[in-house]
Image (cartoon, rainbow, N blue to C red):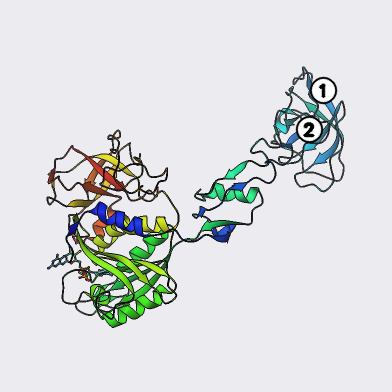
Amino acid sequence: MADIRSVDEHLAEIVATVRPLDPIELPLSDAYGCVLTEDVTVPVALPSFDNSSMDGYAVRVADLEGADERYPAVLEVIGDAPAGGDTPAPTVGPGRAVRIMTGAPLPPGAEAVVPVEWTDGGTGGGPAESMAGHGPVIGGEVRVHRPVSPGQHVRRRGGDVAAGALALAAGTLLTPPRIGLLAAVGRASVPVRPRPRVAVISTGSELVPPGRPLAPGRIHDSNGFALAAAVREAGGEPYRVAAVVDDPVELRAVLTDQMGRADLIITTGGVSVGAYDVVKAALSGPEAPPGSVEFHRLAMQPGKPQGFGVLVGAAGERVPLLALPGNPVSAYVSFELFVRPAMRVLAGRLDRHRPRARAVLAAEAPLTSPKGKRQFLRGALAGTGRGAPVPDGPAGGSGRADGSGGATGDLPGGPVSAARDGLTVSPVGGAGSHLVAALARADCLIVVPEEVTEVAPGTGVEVVLLDRDH
Ligand SMILES: Nc1nc2c(c(=O)[nH]1)N[C@H]1C(S)=C(S)[C@@H](COP(=O)(O)OP(=O)(O)OC[C@H]3O[C@@H](n4cnc5c(N)ncnc54)[C@H](O)[C@@H]3O)O[C@H]1N2
Ligand code: MOO
């Protein structure tokens, strides 16, 4: 094992080594959560024609001057304008109106739309609540109870975005509204960085899949499932592999297999100093697959033993591999700190880390932490300031926002912001890295920096928000 290295050094190596995936053209329905790699300009204005924002009547403004309920303007209804109608509505001349539905093109001659509620709906009675269903006979009169101003209830052509304008810039993350915009401007597919395909390989001869009975000394494989879910949550495509026994030959075969289809491989277990540390064994010596994976002891708890490197596949493909420790809490914390940013680099994303916040420690007794290690304790947040994040950056580092881009986005920078009103955090469970039930109750990680050995109740601490994506 090499010397002890810091969390930041390990993260910096990972982020500097991993490269964004080559762009592909994806159908719009598959592009959610991906990063656009080219600018998209608007081919036609949005809206592409003047249209009504209300169900009502398309009218001329002068016809309604001074209208009120006692002295309504009486207009002749000369046609219907449904949204998506096949025949153009007739021209609205003086003293005339066209019944119009929301989204229908404004008929020629019309200057505004009065909502049906401002009229009698053509019934000859009081104010209408809705429009009568359309029938074969169009016509009659409508009484309008209020005047209207020019352009009122009309959505103007280009009022949202003009033709030729930039709809979305290269580098934009495709959120649901942005997918909607692309569809609205008629794009059926877009160039994006694909979702990273991540192979998740649990190791350990003691592991049994959930649903199968346990023999003495066996446990269920929880890492494989938790990390596959974490991959999905971080925007990747997980390939969960059935747990591999502590046999380097078998593990090498699985790794070779996964190299052909995965963009990133994560393993759990087998990286410590035991006699059966299969990941270390498989990736060392002359039989190891081409590439280089190095193992380190990190100055953190949990998550001390870690491996990272790049394997080289048969076709020359370079597949980064992160070897995480087997203890379930260690594996999950390692995922959050190292795998998530690696995946985000692959995906071309700049929001690589969970948001962080400051919270006041609510605890019976001081928290203690080993000197020289960055500790990540599980916590539960409460209070009115819940979820007010500080700028993105590496947890526990001095952190600067890396959402603005820049190759050094994962290196330390400015300070995190001050405590938010009323946000408190309570530790959940203890420091043991086998405590899966406590982890399941936690919604944040409490970060105790390397130089801090004790945190008194009432003190402000940094927390990583596990239920916030970016
Ligand atoms: N003598 C020492 N022993 C250990 C040290 C050390 O420094 N000196 N470090 C400890 C720390 S810290 C950790 S973390 C673990 C890491 O060990 P490995 O990565 O080699 O993991 P395993 O030994 O395979 O397993 C550890 C633990 O986790 C359970 N496990 C493993 N995989 C799964 C899984 N997929 N689902 C659920 N649980 C899993 C496994 O049964 C063990 O209980 O080493 C310490 N020891
Ligand atoms: O580093 Mo281990 O991950 O403390 O349990």
Residue ranking furthest to the bottom: 249
Residue at 64% over, 39% down: 161
Q: Quadrant of residue 393?
A: top left
Q: Quadrant of residue 24?
A: bottom right
Picture layout, residue 62 above or below residue 11: above
Q: Amino acid at mark 2?
A: Ala
Q: Amino acid at mark 1?
A: Asp
Q: Residues within 10 Å of mark 2 (few under 14, many from 20)?
A: many
Q: Nearer the viewer, residue 100 or 467?
A: 467
* Residue linked to disc 1: 63
Residue at 39% over, 59% down: 343
Label located before the other in sequence (2 or 1): 2
Q: Quadrant of residue 92?
A: top right
Q: Nearer the viewer, residue 260 or 276?
A: 260
* Residue linked to disc 2: 58
User: Where is residue 298 shown, x and y percent of the image?
Assistant: 20, 58
Quadrant of ligand 2 in image: bottom left
Residue at 35% over, 55% down: 15
